[in-house]
Image (tube, rainbow, N blue to C red):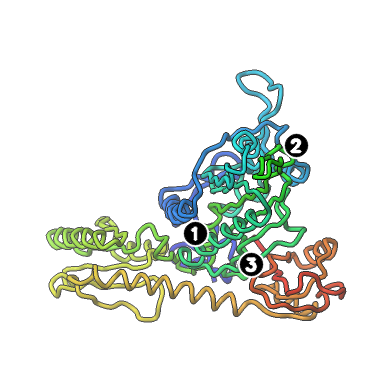
Amino acid sequence: MGRDERGVTPQHEDFSAWYNELVAKAQLVDRGPAKGTMVIRPYGYRLWELIQDELDRRIKDTGHENAYFPLLIPESYLQREADHVEGFSPELAVVTHAGGKELEEPLIVRPTSETIIGEMMAKWVSSHRDLPLLLNQWANVVRWELRPRMFLRTTEFLWQEGHTAHADEADAMRETMLALDLYTEVARDVAAIPVVPGEKTAGERFAGAVRTFTIEGMMRDGKALQAGTSHYMGNNFAKAFDIQYTSEAGQLELCHTTSWGMSTRMIGGVIMTHGDDKGLVLPPRLAPYQVVIVPIGRGVQGAQTSAAARELAGRLKAAGVRAHVDDRAQLSPGFRFHDWELRGAPVRLELGPRELESGTVMMAKRLGDEGKQNIPLSSAPELLPGVLENFQAFLLHRATEFRDAHTVRVESWDSFTEAVASGWALVFHCGKAACEADIKAKVAATPRCIPLDGAPETGRCVLCGDASDYGKRVIFGRAY
């Protein structure tokens, strides 16, 4: 076995090599000059823009406003919240010199913005009338990464981070769950990733949070990917930054805050949820080009098919379809077909002299058993939106079936080790941090989440045999 004709290692042979080769060959990303950084190429950045468009619209529709906060944060700000600084210390990039001089106080390149936003919230909130304060930021963050992998773990990455302040716990928890619902919707309905929403265990919580919620997706190697998180901070940051308001009764009260984020690792999630040995498989709602038209022919015939392809692309765009004409005449049709399979275009249309004469165009979907089929050239703009919607639904269904087939309810340790080798295990757990650590040391599996929709159930911990905590089964798995 080995690489196929496009040089991509088959998934079953080496999933990690498949991924690393694919992100480069599909022109999504390149390595940056500084360790662990990435250059997002136009095709990859368009994927991020489409995710951003979908999520930003939902964020604004729920009453949040975008703002921007500084990249550099005084070191003392992080030190105000003890758990926060302890959690992030190993990942911090610190600026000690600027303008040719040593700084009086080092500056942290933001790993996340709770501290700088908390400082501003304390200035902007004084009365109950100022609440809730609903902010969102699109930004880059830096977390020093020892084992980088493009999109999944890089020293610098892009994300949005929502930060909100509320009068009480109930309102803040509604916000925390609203954000989780937005992430679930974008992952499921846009990226076609059937994520499981749930709560993190204490050992997996965000540094400084009271409760952390997550959406977990299963990749095609059976590993989990944390695709978005939402945190209820309680009063922790309000105490640290003096975020207070005067209640209707005239009492000075501490705010309750939240934060939540989704990042460019979603692109990695799309690649690993849907891709195959031929390359990317992109859900139509995220594909930079939903339909790629390949005109075929040379000389006069080539000019005719190219002109017809451009005319068809114009009609598709008018119908709301992102269409692209690949008229690289110096490259063979076969090369172009393979190239767009590698780059994951959902639908390819082949237009040669024979099709032009018969008033048809040859349609090939990126996945499916139907094979190529001729469709009328005249009605393609009416037909293709439905084809794309069906393909989107097919990908979600396929990914859901794969996840369910690789998620196993287990009772014994032997069954547990077998389950996490290729997927997820639904098990009882005692809730003790030491037991979590033992499981991780033995089989490299961690508690991914306590599923929100899990049925009430109790039993004995899969490792130590103590009574289970949480009141339901927990998903354990190996993760990115």
Marks 1, 3: nearer the viewer = 3
Mark 2: few, some, or many residues within 10 Å (few <14, many ≥20)?
Answer: some
Disc on the earlier residue, 2 or 1: 1
* Amino acid bearing label 1: Leu
Q: Which residue in the protein does label 3 denote?
A: 223
Observer-nearest residue: 214 or 292?
Answer: 214
Which residue position is annotated with label 1?
A: 22
Q: Residue at x 72, y 65 (%)?
A: 447
**Depth order, front residue of 46/277:** 46
Mark before the other along the chain sequence, 3 or 2: 2
Query: Is residue 249 at least partly visible in the picture?
Result: yes
What is the secondary structure assignment of the residue under circle 2? helix
Q: Earlier in the sequence, mark 1 or mark 3?
A: 1
Q: Is residue 434 above or below residue 127?
A: below
Q: CA distance from mark 2 to mark 1?
A: 41 Å
Which residue type does callout 2 highlight?
A: Gln
Q: Residue under circle 2?
A: 79
Q: Please state the horizontal and vertical placement of residue 227, each as a whole percent of the image.
A: 58, 59
